[in-house]
């Protein structure tokens, strides 16, 4: 079992920045591929970014690639999502997710473990 706890959400004006954190516990962190997803009201959960555990390659959805940076600190069992140049359309609940192995997927049902989510609201 893996427990994931997100933090760092909040209210920010358009153009501002936020840094989300996701702390993992319960098993070996280095064997997990980690992902960030988001879900806006009335919409499906959407892939944002993922980092594989072997090699550390990071993948982004097109709409955030030039603005968001995902990183992982294996010594702290934590992943981060640095979000810059935020836009109102980035408003959503952001979820951290984990799956075993070194493949990433942009499909939510490929991930086995989920955090409780943290709200990000970007005002115009």
Image (spheres, grey):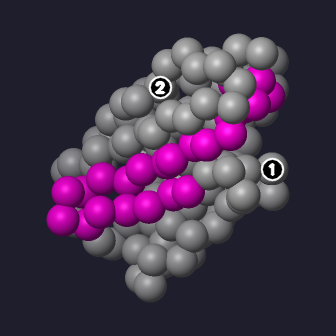
Answer left or right for 12 relative to 78.
Answer: right
Is residue 98 in view? yes
Q: Residue at x 65, y 19 (%)?
A: 13
Q: How many marks?
A: 2
Neighbor class of circle 1 (other Cα within 10 Å; few <14, some 14-19, many 20+) is: few
Query: Magenta segment, which residues?
Result: 69-91
Q: Does residue 112 appear left or right of residue 85 in this picture?
A: left
x and y percent of residue 1 in the render? Answer: 28, 50
At 77% from the left edge and 24% from the top edge, which residue is drawn? Answer: 88
Quarter occupied by residue 120: top right
In the picture of the structure, the residue carrying the numbered disc 1 is 63
Q: Which mark is residue 79?
A: none
Q: Is residue 80 above or below residue 100?
A: above
Q: Nearer the viewer, residue 107 or 39?
A: 39
Earlier residue among tags 2 and 1: 2
Q: Residue at x 50, y 19 (%)?
A: 10
Image vertical order of residue 64 relative to residue 38, above or below: below
Q: Quadrant of the C terminus?
A: top right
Q: Residue at x 38, y 42 (%)?
A: 21
Q: Quadrant of residue 85?
A: top right
Queried whether the magenta region covers residue 72, the answer comes back as yes
Q: Is residue 58 magenta?
A: no
Instruction: Tell me if I can see residue 109 in this picture.
Output: no
Residue at numbered disc 2: 9
Q: Residue furthest bottom?
A: 55
Toward which corner of the image does residue 43 lie, by quadrant?
A: top right
Q: Where does the image place residue 8, in percent across and percent down from the top left? A: 40, 30
Label 2 packing within 10 angstroms: few (<14), some (14-19), many (20+): some
């Amino acid at each position: 079992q893996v427990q994931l706890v997100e933090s760092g959400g909040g209210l920010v004006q358009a153009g501002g920045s936020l840094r989300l954190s996701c702390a993992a516990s319960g098993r070996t962190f280095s064997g997990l591929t980690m992902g960030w997803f988001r879900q806006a009201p009335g919409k499906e959960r959407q892939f944002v970014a993922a980092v594989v555990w072997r090699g550390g390659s990071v993948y982004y959805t097109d709409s955030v690639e030039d603005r968001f940076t995902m990183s992982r600190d294996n010594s702290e069992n934590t992943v981060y999502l640095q979000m810059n140049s935020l836009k109102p359309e980035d408003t959503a609940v952001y979820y951290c997710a984990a799956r075993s192995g070194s493949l990433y997927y942009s499909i939510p049902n490929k991930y086995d473990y989920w955090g409780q989510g943290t709200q990000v609201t970007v005002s115009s």
